[in-house]
Structure formats: C-alpha cells, structure tokens
Image (tube, coloured by chain):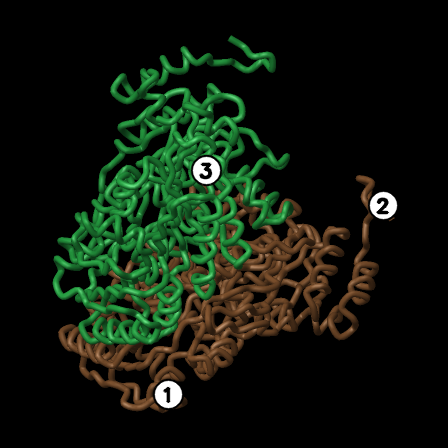
Chain colours: A brown, B green
Amino acid sequence: MLREDGEAFVDDATFLERLERIVGPEGLRAGRLGRALYRRDASFLNAEPLAVCAPATVAQAQQVVRLCREASVPFTPRGAGTGLAGGAVPVAPERAPLVVALGRLDRIIHIDPEHRRAWVQPGVPNARLSERAAPYGLRFAPDPASQIAATLGGNVATNAGGIHCLSEGVTSAHVLAVELLGADGELHLLGGDLPEQGGLDLRGLAVGSEGTFGLVTKACVRLQPLPPQTRTLLAGFPSAVAAARAVSRIVTGDTLPAALELMDREAVELVEPYARAGYPMDAEAVLLAEFEGLPAEVAHGAEAASEACTAEGATSVEIARTAEHRTKLWKGRKGVAGAIAKRAPDFYLHDVVVPRSGLADMLAGVLEIAADEELLVINVVHAGDGNLHPFLLFDREDPGVLDRVLRAGHRIVETALAAGGVLTGEHGVGIEKRDLLGDVYSEDDLAVQRAVRDAMDPSGLANPGKVLPSPQGCAEGTQRLVPEGTWV
Amino acid sequence: MLREDGEAFVDDATFLERLERIVGPEGLRAGRLGRALYRRDASFLNAEPLAVCAPATVAQAQQVVRLCREASVPFTPRGAGTGLAGGAVPVAPERAPLVVALGRLDRIIHIDPEHRRAWVQPGVPNARLSERAAPYGLRFAPDPASQIAATLGGNVATNAGGIHCLSEGVTSAHVLAVELLGADGELHLLGGDLPEQGGLDLRGLAVGSEGTFGLVTKACVRLQPLPPQTRTLLAGFPSAVAAARAVSRIVTGDTLPAALELMDREAVELVEPYARAGYPMDAEAVLLAEFEGLPAEVAHGAEAASEACTAEGATSVEIARTAEHRTKLWKGRKGVAGAIAKRAPDFYLHDVVVPRSGLADMLAGVLEIAADEELLVINVVHAGDGNLHPFLLFDREDPGVLDRVLRAGHRIVETALAAGGVLTGEHGVGIEKRDLLGDVYSEDDLAVQRAVRDAMDPSGLANPGKVLPSPQGCAEGTQRLVPEGTWV
C-alpha cells in the first residue's frame, strides 16, 4: 500500500503482524487489557499505546525499531514505569506509539571487580546490581527509593538520583558508557569503559535524554567500594523549618553525609506503624543523616551532625546502634509512597529542587499551597540536595479535585523556580513539566535543545512529545492525557 | 563587495578595520610578530592566524563573533595556550582563522561560600580561583600541572584533568553551568547554578567540546571544602613495573588517594636538583601518593599505601612530615615540563590513558618505542587514572628527528588503544589526534558526533578543523601545520 506521498504505508494490523513475527506472541500485548496496563507510569498521566512489545534480545529490539521506522510508528521506551513525570506514557501527535518494554533485557553481563565497573542490560533492577556486586565488596551508588523495581535503563534515561547521591552524585557520574539503539535502527556506543574517549561527550548527553534518542540497550557503570562503616543519626524537631536549618548547618560542616533526608510528621505517622523503626511520633519533622567511611570519620560526622541538630533545637537525637535498626529506619523512609494508600486512594508526587538555603521557606510554601487548595500534603525531602518530594493526597471521586491537585502542583513548581530552584530533581521532564521548560529556558536556548535532539533522532520517532515543548507552545496531548474515567 | 554567490564579501583589510573598531588597537594584534606568537599552543603544531584579538568584555566578544559571522571568518578560541593537542592552533581549510584570546576576561565574578560555587570568567587562571576561595575554606578541585597559567575557560573546553582528579573527577564534574557565546552571536546559558535543569544536558556536552561550539564567556563551578589534613607518601622502586604494580594495589584498597603520581628516574634526575625535595636518586621510579581527610583517615590511607609499596618491593618509603616538604615534592612533580629545557631544546608531550591494570605493560611499551626510535623519553604518569604523559625529547636541528618523534607518538597512541585505552586523558583531541578518532569510533558514530556538532554550530566557524576528522578522511592542514622552519 502506498501513501499519498508515495511511501509505503504499513497499517496497524500489518504492523502488529510483523511485530509478532519479531518478538513472538509472548513478547507482544496488543489486546485491550495489555494496552490499558501500559497507559501510565507512576505519574497520573496516561494515554493509550498502539500496543506493547517486550523484546527478549537486543537483536529483536533492533528489528522492532527498524520496523517502527519503516512503518513510521513512534515508540516509547519503558523500564519499570516508576517515573513521576510521564516519561513512559505513550503519547504522540499523530499515531499512538508502540511501548517498547525493556524488562526482559535483564542480564548483568559482566562484573569487573578489578576495574570496578559492570556492563548491564537496561532491564536490570537497580537494587539487583548492588546485590550481585556485594560479594566483591562493591555497590552501585545511585539508589532511588524505588530501587527494587526501577531499572538501570530507566535510571540512565532520567539521570536518576537517590538517597545516597548527596555525596556520590547522580546517575550520570556513574555511567561510563551507553549503548544506544538509535531511531535509525543502528547501535551506537557512546563513551567507553574508560572515561574521556575523545570527541563530544554524547554519553553524558544521552544520560537524562528520557528516551528521546532511542533505546538504551546496554550500559557500563562504575561500582564503588562498600563503606567500611556506616552510622545513621535520627533527630526529631519541633518544626520543619528547624529541621531545614539543621540541614544547612550539617552540609556546610567538614564531613558531608552520604545521605540526609527529611520527613514531616505526616510521613512519620504513616510509616512508623509499619516500619517500627522508633521514629519520634511527637516531632513535627525528623532528619535522617547517614555517614559512611572509616570508623573515625563516621564518628566525627555523626557527632558534628548531632551537635548541629541540637543547636537548631532538636528535641531528640539518636544514633542507630545496630544494622537492624538502620535497616528499619530506611525501610520507613523508602516505604512512604507505599504506605500512602492508607490515607488516600490517590496521590500526586512532585519533584522539585531549591537551593539548600531556601529549603525552610520552600517547605512553608508547600504547606501553604496545600492548605489553600484544601489538599493533604506529605513531605519527604532529599534535604542535602534541596530536592523536595511533596505528596499531594486526594480521592479521584471527589468532584473537581483534579483541578486543585494540578493547580497546587503548578504553584509548587512556580514557587521553587521563584526561589532560584529547578524544575526536576531526578524524574526528568517527561510530559508533566514539558510546557514549563519555557519558564527555565529562553526560546533561543530551546531551539538549541531541539536542534541537538533532532541531530540525535532526525526521524522524531523516539519517545515523541516528551521533554521539549513544541515550538508552537503545543497543548497537544496534555488534555487527552487525563480524560475522565480512564484511570487504570 | 559581493561574492559570486551573491553574499557580501568582507575582505581581510575591511575585516581588520572593523575588528579594531570593536576591540581597540590594544585588543588587536595583526602584525607579523603578533601572528607568529599565536601560531602554536603547547603542542608543536602551528599555523598562522589571520590576526589575534583579545576582547575586554563579553559585549566586545559578542560583536567580534557577529563580525566573524558576517564576514565568514572562522575563529579559534584561546585560553593560556597550555594544551598539548593543538586545540588552540588556528587552522581552517579555506580562510585563516581569527584567534580570539580570552585572557582579558579574567574576573572572578562571585564566590558563594554558602552554596560552595563560584561564577568566573574564562580567562581566570585555574590556580587563582583556589587562592581566592581559600579564605572561605574552599578550593576548586581540578588542578592541572599547568594550573598557574592554564585558564578555567581552557579547562572547560578540554575537560581538563589534574593531579587531584583521581578522587574528585575531572572538570566536567565541577562545572554547573557554562555561558556559551555561540557562533550565532547569541549567549546561551547551559546548565545553571543548581544541577538538573531539565532538558538535555548541553552543559556536559559543551564541557570538552574544544571550542567547536563557540566561546565560553562565563562558568559556574563547584568549590569544595579544603581537607582538614593532608599526608603525602613518597616511595622509591627498583623498576617502573614494580611501581605500577603498587599503584594497582593502592587503588584497589579501601582508601582512595586524592593523588597518585608516578615519575621515572629520568624525571627525578631532572627535577631533584631544582626542587631539592629529597626524591630518591637511586630509584628507577618513584610514586607520590597523597591522602586527604580527617586525621584518622589520612593516617589509615598512608599506612595502607606504605604497606602496598613495601609489598611490591619499594626500596624506600617516606612520609612528608611538614607542609614545606610536601610543597617541595609537588614543586618537583609539577616542574618536569619546565626543567626539560636542561636536557633537550624540544619535547613532544603525549597524553594517553590505559586501564590501570595495563599500566606496567604500557610503560614498558613506551620505553621500547622510544629506544626503537632512538629518542630519549621521560615518563610522568597520573598513575591512579592510568593517564601517561611521556615526554619525547629531541633537538629540532637533528635531521629527520621530527619523523621519528611523530612516528613514536603515533606508536604510543596505538599501543594504548591496543591495550584497551583511550586517545586522550585531559588535553582533548585537537588537531593532533583528530585523524585517530576513526580508530576509536565507527564511521556511523562519527556521523552522529558531526550531526551534534553541526546542531551546536551550523556555521562551522567555531574552531574549525578540530576534534572530528572530515568525512573524506581529510589530510587537510596536518601537512602544513609543521612546515620546516616555522618554529617560533
């Protein structure tokens, strides 16, 4: 069949038939339920894909992309779907995209303890790599709270952060090479297993490109020695503002914690009954500060942090004395999202960053906005980085609540930007923040971003509709992303 | 005047006249001597520029670039000219480029101790920033050996390394934002003073782009706390191979040194009479290992390193007991290039990287190649990174020596690549390694690199002839870069 422009047109039925020949029936979901399951990620944006396929090998993935190219079908890469910004939601202006789920490419190809690096496939869950590296005394430092599910491919695509990225830097600092399956159907090795390959740093450019260059089919990541000792400090404060002040004091000291997290009373009340970690229930906010290193180093850091907390009015300061206690404390921190179901059927989790010095004001601002929009808010903060994650709680059955949630979210982002902050900490721009990018970049700068993206994917088939607003200030998609009654 | 294609043609005389109106007579060197002085950088490649201009303000720089654009004159940015790869050598296939020297833009705009960052102009010498940050207890971590002269703009352009980059990472890890004056004459802010701006990481792409995107007119860099304590260990070995083995043993231990340098006997013999640091004159190779941190941490690191050296047969191991002794040791290490004039009138300094485990073999290979080509070689090595800097010594008056030097250099690079290494450690690709990039990248990958470069500078006027080989496998330039008798 030929289109008007003379190119062969591959209709949906033919496309799906050819797709099935590549990935087999077990690698394809084109039915109503399969399409419904892959409408959304951990954001509440959603849209219907043409179909979902899960290649079992890189060769299959390559054939899939070549078919997409031939048929002009856009495709949306997907890891574990834990992203908060809609990066894995299949949208496109013209034709519904194919979701390419990379979960079956889940091999740890090689761990090289001598050079402290590993080659991995994109579907490996983050936590599994550290588990497998542990016998060599090594770990993969970036540890998003969703690390049991979140995949390394998704981590690379979003340049994910994590609780221990305060001292170690985010994903980009830990990725030496990315094998990219471009929308041209070719495999490109960006970077290599040594740093500084010469030429432009396309590796760094690909990290955080949110699937808009193609699929990550392989990555070489740095592994780091497990710390000889760890010490975790828990402090309770009479106000979130006091806790935020303690953060500034700790971070400007001479020992940087490996992790520094803040939770408000609402968060503590949610997780304590389940984690039984001994979080102080009378505090308005708690800080968790973890120090890693040699015994003298962690002792010094914990002592200095303890003094800083006391100086800012902490009502309790405690050191976790056992590994078990430490595990429980982190179980609590990482379990917030899971525990929220007890409070409300739905939540909208935000991801913004402010300069550390603006943390106290920003927290006050979030509380004010939530009160104003009559929403319950729960705050967990990667405090050392100034990265806030306010959970806005709601019940979708509540008439008009979606408007209030969206408005509150927008106001939170605007407040962060006004405080000298940035749009996103670690979940990327996706669809959610796409049209806000114009608040951060000039039209000129966006044009440069677009030119570079076009250079990496001239076809525009790789994860369309994400990250960059269209030059016309497109509203395309956003409306039909959250139609009434399409929650799954 | 109109060219054949109908565009206005600005001849050289008119161009220079208009240039002088922008930068004033004090900002322009168009005479024979001025042009001769800016033929080369610290490589021995050289070519004659159309002229040299040194804008005094960013506004002037912007007018200069706009004039270049209008007149289709290519331009070559220049910092202090300490690069080893010819990145600041003005070459172009058609019209000789204008050298834009950025040394007059040398203001430290703002040091922000609370957020540990500084905004700087490109002409600020690397060492000056750390000097100015010291009263706040801060420093700029990347410290190339040429740091007294080398500018931050040049550091950004080449993604420079340095002695203390073993533990802290190279320049890219310390740059939050780059203000780029594109060849379009517009200022683009890439990144920002907080990490994770959203969108593609063009900041990271610009770091190491070697002037091919335009001029760096401003940068925001991270500052780090000065270490509470420093301990430096000096060990002598009966062979370079033994020293290289000690490196592997130290680096795989539990405390990573801040710096780990290797010098061979030839290097020690050169610098000891001048530095009087107490380097062992009977050793075939010496290691310098520096530990930074809390007292217990540096003591532990130095002790472990000392044991590692002894285990690999070190003939002497000593800890620098005073700050003065430490300063002398580093003065020796950083003074190698300067001291070489005592041994030979000319040198060709290389910059290659191998995996650490291949260091001993690579050193043996360098010695063999030098012997084979009848050249004296002096080895200094950023050993922790596997980054070798062999100095090939020669006298240009010696007939045919240049061929041997170039051949030896080429063989060294090929040996490094065969050992799983990379082309360049910290000086970039420039012209020197441009035509070797095809040994590292496929033609396909080079096409992607070219597409991205074209997206960042569609005009091709920014530092042409650098980094990427032309698709036709161009030999343009290389021949006329080192014509007989053009040494300056």
**Is label 1 on the same chain as label 2?**
yes
* Picture coordinates of residue A172, whole percent (x, y): 45, 60
Which residue is identified by label 1?
Answer: A328
Q: Amino acid at mark 3?
A: Phe
Asked if residue B42 shows in the view, the reply is yes
Query: Counting other residues with Cα less than 10 Å from the Cα at mark 2, is it few (<14), some (14-19), or many (20 or more)?
Result: few
**Left or right of residue A482: residue A392:** left
Label 1 is found on which chain of the structure? Answer: A
Residue at image point 45% right, 81% down = A134
Asked if residue A472 shows in the view, the reply is no
Mark 1, mark 2: which one is toward the viewer?
Answer: 1
Mark 2, mark 3: which one is toward the viewer?
Answer: 3
Q: Work out how far the residue at label 1 is from the one at label 2, CA to CA, in angstroms.
A: 62 Å
Q: Secondary structure at mark 3?
A: loop
Residue at image point 72% right, 63% down = A59
Q: Amino acid at mark 1?
A: Lys
* Picture coordinates of residue B268, whole percent (x, y): 27, 53
**Left or right of residue A274: residue B142:** left
Where, quadrant-wise, is the C terminus of chain B in this rendering? top left
* Picture coordinates of residue A359, whole percent (x, y): 27, 63
Residue A366, above or below A467:
below
Q: Amino acid at mark 2?
A: Leu
Which residue is identified by label 2?
Answer: A2
Label 2 is found on which chain of the structure? Answer: A
**Mark 2 in CB contact with mark 3 (< 8 angstroms):** no
Which residue is identified by label 3?
Answer: B213
Towards the viewer: A61 or B241: B241
